[in-house]
Image: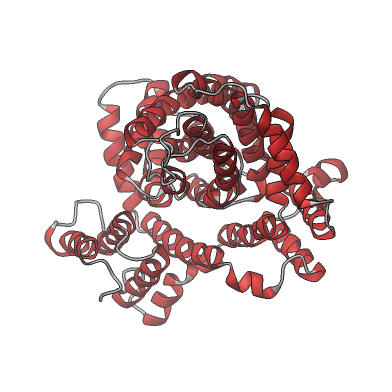
Amino acid sequence: MSYAKPIPSMVALALGLIIWFVIPVPEGVTPQAWHLLAIFIGTIAGIIGKAMPIGALAIIGIMLVAITGVTSDKPSQAIADALSGFSNSLIWLIGIAIMISRGLIKTGLGNRIAYYFISIFGKRTLGIGYALAISELTLAPITPSNTARGGAIMHPIMRSIADSFGSTAEKGTERKVGEYLALVNYNANPITSAMFITATAPNPLIVSLIAKGTEANITISWGMWALAALVPGIVSLLVMPLVLYFCFPPELKQTPNATAFAKEKLSELGAFKLNEKILLGVFALLLLLWAGVPAAIFGPEFKFNATTVAFLGLSILLVTGVLTWDDILKEKTAWDTITWFAALVMMAGYLGKLGLIGWFSGVIQQNVGALGFGWAGVIAMLVLVYFYAHYFFASTTAHITAMYAAFLAAGIALGAPPLLLALILAFSSSLMMSLTHYATGTAPIVFGSGFVSLGRWWIAGFIMSVVNLLIWAVVGGAWWKVLGYW
């Protein structure tokens, strides 16, 4: 049996071959850029169709770039170009951060944090919803895998609470509390993913695309991203459980047993263990350094590179034994992420260098510009098209790599404030995950538990997409004006 899925693989291959050999190279585009686009589109199609694991597709993409010589006629330079993505520090930031976050599961600290908030807010179903949202927010800055955070840490806790009230899909009692809690469990994930660079894997890719797209005139730091997302993110997290509560009301409103259940689980976990204390201390250190607190207090000589800080945190955990080297070697998600990010960042970077992104953004600019909108209308149209195009993507990374740079360049050319547009598109790249049951890795995990029907999931996703876009446009827009971003 073939490792690759035949139909998605043939579709991806056909798209690449058609672009390479059949479609004429457009005026203003070099053959090298067009041929790299063929490889890129074929890779993205393979990712969307899940022809193979994304890491395997990345290896094939790297091989094709090197063997076809689309970036250089010299074989030695071509393979150097193909492997250049591995030298991107942002890729290693997210990979190392995923390794560090493994400690949340290994030590049980992630469960302890979630059960603590449930023990405080769990007397009502709405309160449990807020406890789940607050737990997500607490874990987000140091859990760059949103799937691990929402699916591996939060979802089992949410399921155990629903089960304790006899709310299960098997019994047909999912609307008792399970449906509501599952929707909150999932819809907190896109919001918290938008709030920190280190809250989901594609965010560092966006930072890289912004820097390249503006010729390094705009550089987004960890602290700048977090500050920009703070107010609209908090408002979204406050509004989301309420909106879902009224649109999908749970049959059981009072849940005093949830507090007792959470306290029982905390009791089972026992007192804070040394490894948990070390991990908590490392997380505090990382957040302080990522936020630039020492530099703000003591001067610029105490400013640290974000990736260097991540390596510092991992080193401390290895030295203290909180994590072992075997833990790191077994962290397949991190190594997989490093591999496919390197390939996609490399291809996206060379599409820009070879002029393809500039050409594509010019096409968008011409079509949008013909409508005669001012810059506010331009931003609204670009964001809406970019956001709702996610109905056609099963990977945020594929979506971002395919569309972000071109939409950013087109909007800037049409007069949109560069930093404002960059931020709105960046935050939309996470918020759009609310739309479908396949929008990101967390979605199939929560949807697969059976608490929410397909139709109600899509309705909830569309409702939250509208609510989140309005909050981030209105509240966020006002906040960014205060910060001087436009």
Left or right position of 299 against 428 = right
Q: Residue furthest bottom?
A: 76
Residue 461 image offset from top left, x and y in percent? 40, 31
Residue 479 image offset from top left, x and y in percent? 61, 23
Q: Nearer the viewer, residue 450 or 272?
A: 450
Q: Residue at x 48, y 40 (%)?
A: 430
Left or right position of 35 against 150 = left
- Picture quarter containing residue 385? top left
Q: Nearer the viewer, residue 223 or 98?
A: 98
Residue 221 appears anywhere in the view: no
- Picture quarter containing residue 47? bottom left
Image quadrant occupied by the N terminus: bottom left
Total labels drawn: 0
Q: Residue furthest right?
A: 298
Residue 157 image offset from top left, x and y in percent? 60, 44
Q: Residue at x 83, y 52 (%)?
A: 272
Image quadrant occupied by the C terminus: top right
Residue 425 appears anywhere in the view: yes
Q: Residue at x 49, y 28 (%)?
A: 176
Q: Nearer the viewer, residue 158 or 191?
A: 158
Q: Reply above or below: 270 against 190.
A: below
> How does the figure colour the protein chain or chains?
secondary structure
- Picture quarter containing residue 388? top left
Q: Residue furthest left?
A: 22
Q: Residue at x 38, y 65 (%)?
A: 53
Residue 368 image offset from top left, x and y in percent? 29, 30
